[in-house]
Amino acid sequence: MSSSTPTSFLLPAHGWDEHWESTFNTVAGHAAGAVPARVLRTERGLCEVITDRGPARVGLRPAQHTGSGTGPTTGDWIAVLPATDTAAAMLEAVLPRRTALARAGADGNPRGQLLAANVDTVLIAVSLAAPVRRARTERLLALAWESGARPVVALTQADTHPDPQAAREELASVALGVDVLLTSAPTGEGITELRAVLEGTIVLLGASGVGKSMLGNRLLGTDLLATGPVRAVGGKGRHTTAWRELRPLPGGGVLLDTPGLRSIGLTGADEGVSHTFADLEDLAAQCRFSDCRHHTEPGCAVLAAIANGTLQARRLESYRKLQRETAWMASRTDARARAERTGDAKTLTKHLRAGCRGRERPR
C-alpha cells in the first residue's frame, strides 16, 4: 500500500472524523493490527478501499460477500487486517452505518439492494431536456428521505429548456423542504450555488442520460467520470457509470457516482413517503374522520384541497401508490422474518432430536 498523498490527509479527505475514529476503536480495537479504511467500490469477493497508506484490495470471507446482506458496500467504513507475506488483506468488520441508501430488489426481495452507505446528501439529478416526470421525482425523494440523508434536486441541462424558472417552480411544488437548483454542466450555470448546499458524502442519483456524470465532473473540477451521448429519441442515455465509486471533492466532501437507476423500488419503510408528502399528511390530519381514506368521505380536507386547486389529484394518486408499495414490501419483510424464525426453530428441533437419538441406550 503506497501513495504520493501524505497519509494524514487520505482518510479525512474521504470523510474520516472523530465519530468514525471512536466507532473504529469500539468495534475493532480488539483486532490486533486492524486498520480503518473506506470502501471505494465493491466486486464479487473483494472490495477496493482507501487506507491511511493508500488504495488497497481487500478480500472478503464467504459470509461477507457483496449481496449477502452483511457484506460491505460503497461508502462503508471498515476494519481491515493488512496483507502479510503469507496472506492477503482481509475484511475484519464493517462499522455500523450512519445512513444507508437502499432500493427494493427487482425480484421483489424485501432485503433490497444497498446502493451506498454513510451518505449525508442525496443529489437527485433531473433533466430538463425531456418532460419532467414528477411521480418519478417523488419516488426518488422518498428513497432519499428513507435513507436518513438530506436530498437536494439539481435540474440539469437547464440551458435546453425554454422556461427553466417555470420548470424549477413546478418541481419545487413536489420537492417540499428541498433545495431545487437549476444547473447546466456545459455552461457552468448553478454549479457554485449547488456546491454551497452540498455537504459530507454526496451520492448522485438519477436515470441514465440526465447528465449525472457531467454534473459530477463539474463538481470534481475535472473529467474523472465517464460521460456518453444522449439518444435523440426520448432524451434517454446509456449507462456510462458501470459501478459505484467514491471520489474526494476539491473543496471538501466526497462524491459517489452511481449507474443510472431504471427501477426505484421502496424497501418498506414509510418514513420516506411521509416526509415526501408532508403537505398531504398535514391535510389528512384535518379530515373529519381519523380513518378517512380520501375517497368520498364528508369533511375530507384532502378532497377539499383538490377541489379548490391547492392540491393536485395526481399527487394524491402518487401518494397512494407509494403507500401501497411500502405496505406490500413491509408485509414481505415480516413474512420473510417469520419464515426465517420458523426455519431456525425447525433446524434446532432437528438437531435436538438427532442428539436425543444419539444418547439412546442400546438394547
Image: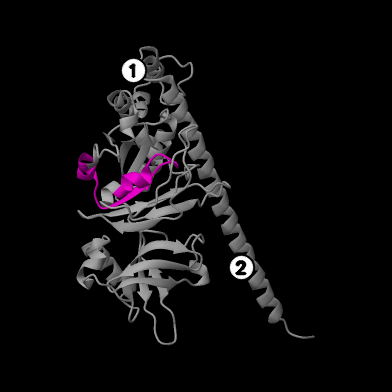
Q: What is the crowding at mark 2: few (fewer than 14 residues within 10 Å), some, or many (at least 20)? A: few
Whole-angstrom CA distance, mark 2 to mark 1, is 58 Å
Which residues fall within the magenta stretch? Answer: 192-217
Could you tell me which residue is drawn at 40 percent across and 29 percent down?
Answer: 132
Which residue is at the far top?
A: 308
- Which colour assignment does the render follow? one colour
Q: Nearer the viewer, residue 55 or 170?
A: 55
9 drawn magenta: no
Q: Nearer the viewer, mark 2 or mark 1?
A: 1
Instruction: Tell me which numbered mark, 2 or 1, is placed earlier along the sequence.
Output: 1
Task: Kindly identify which residue carries mark 2.
Answer: 348
Element on which disc 2 rests: helix
Q: Nearer the viewer, residue 332 or 361?
A: 332
Q: Work out whether residue 316 can be spotted.
A: yes
Which mark is on residue 310? 1
Q: Nearer the viewer, residue 279 or 57?
A: 57
In the rendered image, residue 163, in percent from the top left (x then y), is placed at 31, 23
Q: Nearer the viewer, residue 10 or 118?
A: 10
Q: Work out whether residue 149 can be spotted.
A: no
Instruction: Describe residue 216's horizontal placement relative to residue 130 as left or right.
Output: left
In the rendered image, residue 166, in percent from the top left (x then y), is placed at 30, 23
In the rendered image, residue 50, in percent from the top left (x then y), is placed at 33, 68
In the rendered image, residue 315, in percent from the top left (x then y), is placed at 42, 25
The image shows residue 210, relative to residue 9, as above or below, that is: above
